[in-house]
Amino acid sequence: MGGKGSKTNKKKNPAELTEEEIQLLLNNTTFSREEIIKWHEGFIKDCPKGQLDKKKFIDAYQAFYPQGKADKFCSHVFKVFDSDNSGQIDFTEFLIAISVTAQGDASKKISMAFRMYDVDKNGKIDKKEMEKIIEAIYDLLGEEHRKGENSPSERVKTIMSKLDKDQNGYLTEDEFVSGCLEDSVLRALLAPNA
């Protein structure tokens, strides 16, 4: 009777792709069912347990930017992709992020960049947060010329003066998105895939 085996508290194996997840991805990305299944096969080949941790994520990024230091920048990116704050990126989080960065429209990509730059998640980007991101981008790209107008603090002053329409010392998501959409130079720096 009510023995140990009678409860069905079986947790889903993170390496399995359920029909529910496929439906979620079909509704939130532009990928077809076949593409989702192919992406999943590749993800599981690289992450057999169905989870991508921060270290593996940074290692993967480092392969694309061997001349730079990817860890600071990747920490910001990882936080955005890890939508449930589990310290792991599962396949669904991964593919939604890929979809937005690879296929999303410009404003969606810029919104994702805003969430990455909003380090303390308060819905605003202040000068300090923007400076940390510029430094992380410079590290990633291996940029060594950081003096004069190319210094992170000068770069931030320029960005803030262009985007902070109400001059209150921080950027809202609306200010950030509309400013980047209007200025191709800023868009290339702050949201290069948009």
Image: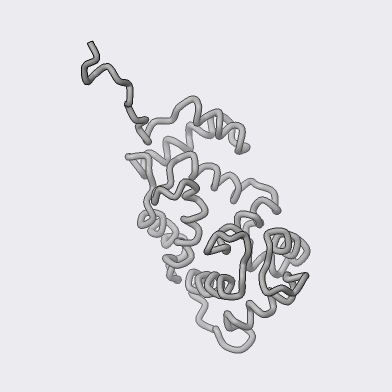
Residue 124 sits in which quadrant?
bottom right
Please state, as top left, top right, bottom left or bottom right, where the N terminus lies in the image.
Answer: top left
Instruction: Tell whether 56 sits left or right of 148.
Output: left
Residue drawn where x is 73% and y is 63% of the image? 175
Whole-percent x, y for residue 31 in the image: 59, 36
Give whichever of 186, 9 is nearer the camera: 9
Whole-percent x, y for residue 105 in the image: 69, 49
Residue 8 sits in which quadrant?
top left
Above or below, 12 relative to 186: above
Determine the residue located farthest toward the top in the rendered image.
1
Please state, as top left, top right, bottom left or bottom right, where the C terminus lies in the image.
Answer: bottom right
Instruction: Tell whether 63 sits left or right of 148.
Output: left
Above or below, 135 relative to 46: below
Residue drawn where x is 43% and y is 47% of the image? 89
Determine the residue located farthest toward the bottom in the rendered image.
148
Residue drawn where x is 37% and y is 43% of the image? 51
Residue drawn where x is 58% and y is 83% of the image? 151
Residue 59 sits in which quadrant?
bottom left
Whole-percent x, y for residue 41 in the image: 42, 35
Instruction: Tell whether 170 sits left or right of 42.
Output: right
